[in-house]
């Protein structure tokens, strides 16, 4: 199983970006999906998560600005980011709990850089 994240880039404060993360391989189903971020010198933190049933949770710092969604047919999770702030600058990683015919395990994407200029 591989996760491929995309959609990062450079944007001005107040702008928007949409991240995508697609899983590929021999996948039976995907349970929880989530986005994390890590800024320089800081620990990786949860940004948003979504369960297989569609329940979502967000870090307080992004509530009302970011929206997580998923497309189960495409094994893809999205993060719509709006009203971006310089403090949102970080490498964003996707994570999925994936069941294959053999095992269930957690997988991480390679990370995509988001830079917000003031």
Image (cartoon, rainbow, N blue to C red):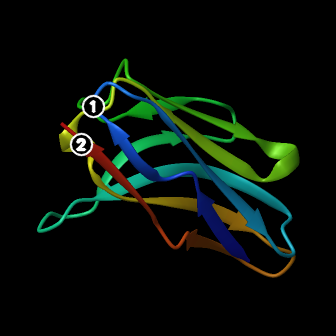
In front here: 52 or 68?
Answer: 68
Residue beneath disc 2: 117
Label 2 to label 1, Cα distance in Å?
6 Å
Quadrant containing the C terminus in the rendered view: top left
CB atoms at circles 2 and 1 under 8 Å apart? yes
- Is 95 situated left or right of 87 in this image? right
- Is 81 situated left or right of 13 in this image? right
> What secondary structure is found at the residue carrying circle 2?
strand
Give neighbour class at mark 1: few <14, some 14-19, many 20+ (Cα, 10 Å): some
- Whole-percent x, y for residue 52 in the image: 69, 41
Residue 78: image quadrant is: top right
In front here: 114 or 45?
Answer: 114
Residue 16: image quadrant is: top left
- Whole-percent x, y for residue 17 in the image: 49, 37
Give neighbour class at mark 2: few <14, some 14-19, many 20+ (Cα, 10 Å): some
> What secondary structure is found at the residue carrying circle 1?
loop
In front here: 85 or 75?
Answer: 85
Closer to the N terminus: mark 2 or mark 1?
Answer: 1
In this rendering, is residue 49 above or below 13?
below
- Whole-percent x, y for residue 62 in the image: 31, 30
Residue beneath disc 1: 13
Say which residue appears at 37% left-offset and 17% top-offset. 64
Residue farthest toward the left in the current orientation of the protein: 41
């Amino acid at each position: 199983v591989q996760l491929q994240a995309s959609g990062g880039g450079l944007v001005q404060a107040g702008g928007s970006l949409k991240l995508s993360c697609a899983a590929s391989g021999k996948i039976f189903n995907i349970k929880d999906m989530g986005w994390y971020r890590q800024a320089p010198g800081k620990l990786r933190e949860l940004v948003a998560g979504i369960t297989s049933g569609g329940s979502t949770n967000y870090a307080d710092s992004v509530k009302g600005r970011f929206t997580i969604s998923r497309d189960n047919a495409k094994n893809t999770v999205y993060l719509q980011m709006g009203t971006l702030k310089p403090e949102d600058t970080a490498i964003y990683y996707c994570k999925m709990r994936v069941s294959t015919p053999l095992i269930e395990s957690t997988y991480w994407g390679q990370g995509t850089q988001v830079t917000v200029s003031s």
